Image (cartoon, rainbow, N blue to C red):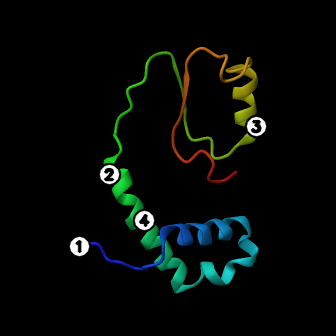
Amino acid sequence: AIRKFSSEPVDFLANRVIQMFRSPEDSIDYMQSQRFAEDMMTLSTRVSAIFEDELRCLFLQSPVYVFGDIHGNLEDLNFFCDNVWNLGMRLTAGKFLFLGDYVDRG
């Protein structure tokens, strides 16, 4: 059974979390609160159905450039920009697949 943590609209919850990331220094009390924990559980529960419906495998036509987790490292991203898609991503033959949480620390 799915436990319902909040009856608030998901947009309201998402906007509250987005605001927290935009201004973390103003959100310390919220991040340490029971409400934050409940918001995270509610959002996780609500998006799990979306994730369950998504394909586990992507079928991509070659050529494909596959990039691992760059952790928001702009130096690596600039290297790729200068050396892999130096004509621009839209003018480079192939598609780009970024794996993992590539923006979590940037």
Question: In the image, which disc is placed on residue 44?
Answer: 4
Residue at position x 73%, y 17% from top?
87
**Residue 35 in picture, x, y percent from top left:** 53, 83
- C-alpha span from label 3 to label 1: 45 Å
- Identify which amino acid the numbered label 3 is placed on: Glu
Say which residue label 2 marks: 52
Q: Where is residue 41 in the image (x, y as percent from the top left)?
A: 43, 72
Q: What residue type is labelled 2?
A: Glu
Residue 31: image quadrant is: bottom right
- Which amino acid does the dot numbered 4 rest on? Ser
**Of the residues under marks 1 and 4, which one precedes in the sequence?**
1
Mark in front: 3 vs 1: 1
Mark 1 crowd level (few <14, some 14–19, many ≥20, 10 Å Cα): few
Residue 54 in the image, given as x and y percentages of width and height:
35, 44
Residue shown at the point (69%, 27%) measured from the top left: 80
Q: In this view, does 82 lie above or below 11?
A: above
